[in-house]
Image: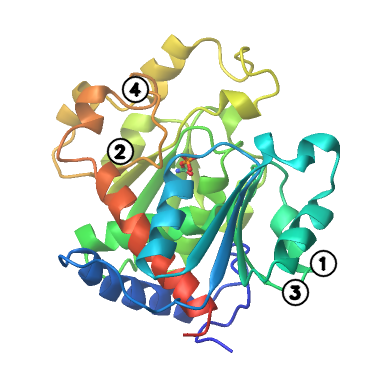
Amino acid sequence: MNDLSIKHLLGIKGMTRDDIETIFSTAAEFKEVLNRPIKKVPSLRDITVANLFFENSTRTRLSFELAQKRLSADVVNFSAASSSVKKGETLVDTVSNIIAMKVDMVVMRHPHPGAPHFLANKVNTTIVNAGDGTHEHPTQAILDSFSIREKLGNDLEGKKVAIVGDIKHSRVALSNILALKLQGATVRVCGPATLIPKHIESLGVEVSHDLDETLAWADVANMLRIQLERQGDKDAIRFFPSIREYTMNFGLTQERLNRLDKELVILHPGPINRGVEISSEIADSDHAIILDQVENGVASRMSIMYLLAGR
Ligand code: CP
């Protein structure tokens, strides 16, 4: 039993607003711990967590590992590239073998949408989705909302959030839409028509192809990376004529910001394509909370694992 309505964190889909609020209030307490000289607490001392990464990661992987170590959990790390997956072992066999070594929780990133959901039905351990293909990245959405609330206050009711760029191939977009809607925010997606999924309005979001008009409307802009590696051929640009044209129409630059007569909170989940979806000048400016997002990722993930473990 835990204080959340969920046994696993597979996606924001299936979570309640109370779940989100419980995670945020616990994350705020862990953030205080992380700012103390001694950053470690014994909360998960007898818990063993396996981090299974079947796809590349810098932020999420290190953030989960640091969160586990700050909670005093025992941690094992698995990278598909150097494992028996390369000899043809199935996902269920791989994870069953790891769980047989008395692992209590599995954090998993996988290129296939639904892989953590599939696993949750096959094995008897707690699963945390660290990103499944183009589907969901729930812990990113939680740390994004936590960071927005630090800037705008705890009530996101009616706040206007724009998610800009490659919505079609982004797991961050779907999880952010679901999390922000749960908190009462108004959400708009903005990008070229070819990078916006058909029928996305059914999620209760607005759609725009005009970045300047969207920035004038928004309180917050979450700038997404162009995901060439998920567009079929990683070296081919298939969804817009050229990077230069994409940047002209959908890149966030100082010139664009100068035209706004207001403050805008700017997020980016990383990794950044500097000079494509966001200029270096903006990414490194006080308007951007990109490193706050990274900092808050550790406290948010501590909160999620602590609550799922029922502590
Ligand atoms: N934001 C994010 O998921 O980054 P990584 O791919 O580096 O984990």
Spatial CA distance of label 2 from label 1 is 45 Å
The reply, left or right, for residue 12 in relation to residue 295 is: right
Q: How many residues crowd mark 3 within 10 Å: few (<14), some (14–19), many (20+)?
A: few
Q: Nearer the N terminus, badge 4 or badge 2?
A: 2
The local secondary structure at tag 1 comes to loop
Q: Secondary structure at mark 3?
A: loop
Above or below, comparing residue 235 to residue 270 in the picture = above
Label 3–label 4 contact, CB within 8 A: no
Residue at left offset 30%, top offset 48%: 220
Query: Which quadrant holds the N terminus?
Result: bottom right
Q: Nearer the viewer, mark 1 or mark 4?
A: 1
Residue 96 visible at all: yes
* Amino acid type assigned to the residue bearing label 3 in the image: Asn
C-alpha distance separating marks 2 and 3: 46 Å
Q: Nearer the viewer, mark 2 or mark 1?
A: 1
Q: Tell me the SS state at disc 4.
A: loop
Nearer-N-terminus badge (3/4) = 3
Task: Give the numbered dot on residue 274.
Answer: 4
Q: Residue furthest front?
A: 101
Q: CA distance from mark 3 to mark 4?
A: 42 Å
Determine which residue is flagged by label 2.
Answer: 215
Residue 257's x, y, as percent? 20, 31
Q: Does mark 4 have its CB less than 8 Å from ligand 1?
A: no
Query: Residue 109 appears at what percent x and percent y?
Result: 61, 49
Q: Amino acid at mark 1?
A: Lys
Q: From the viewer's perspective, is the residue at label 3 or at label 4 nearer?
A: 3
Taking the view exactly as shown, the residue that stands out farthest to the bottom is: 1
Q: Report how far apart the C-alphas of labels 1 and 3 lie in the structure.
A: 7 Å
Judging by the rendered image, the residue that carries numbered circle 1 is 122
Describe the element under mark 2 as helix, strand or loop: helix
Where is mark 3, residue-wise? 124
